[in-house]
Image: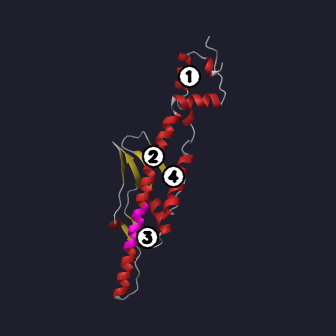
Amino acid sequence: MKFEELSEERKEQEIENLREINTEHNWWEYSLEDICGQIEEKTKIELEGVDLMFDFFRKGHSGVWTDGDTLTRAISDKYPNLEDLDISKEFGVWAYIGLRQDEIENDDIWLYEEDEEVDDLTKLLQDKQDEQTKDNIIDDISEILDIFSKGYNSLYEEYDYLTSDKGIIETIEANDMEFENEN
């Protein structure tokens, strides 16, 4: 039987039985790649979808994040004089009562320093350049966290739709699914 031929009660039962049909595969892959594309477009920092993680349901750990070392490596590709970032092992945005995000300050950024002796003016210029580089890194990380935040909301909306009655009915109809006779 076609879905539209079922009784209303049976339709509700079949929809419930198929609640996870649209999320039994890696439905999020393109969304994570899109997040990475936005990051690259806005910051010129390259991450891949496999570098990102997300979760909606783990208590106290719902959000979008990446490994801190992975992020540090990606940022150092853009800023070769970056030595290290003092960021959390799982760096990202976290959902509690709202979205909270990790933060970073100038003191959390270490740049490689030249070993050679330089005059005071050259040292002053290098320090000024280093401060500008740190400010740029902070701006890039802020942009990444903003994209993570929007990405989390987008992923949640996508999941919500995929598991909604409307999303399931569209899948049933698009796949011309047949159901056993009600009798």
**N-terminal-most mark, 4 or 2:** 4
Element on which disc 1 rests: helix
Residue extending farthest top: 183
Distance of label 4 from label 2 (alpha carbons): 9 Å
Tag 2 residue: 152
Asked whether the beta carbons under mark 1 and mark 2 sit within 8 Å of each other, the answer is no
Q: Which residue is mark 1?
A: 14
Mark 3–mark 1 distance (CA, rounded to whole Å):
55 Å
In the rendered structure, the answer to whether residue 4 lies left or right of residue 136 reads right
Dot 4 falls on a residue whose secondary structure is helix
Task: Give the distance between the C-alpha atoms of the residues marked 1 and 4, in whole angstroms.
Answer: 34 Å
**The quarter of the displayed image where residue 59 is located:** top left
Residue 144 versus residue 108: which sits nearer the camera? Answer: 144
Magenta span of residues: 131-140
Tag 3: amino acid: Leu
Q: Is residue 3 left or right of residue 41?
A: right
Viewer-side label of 3, 2: 2
Identify residue type, mark 1: Glu
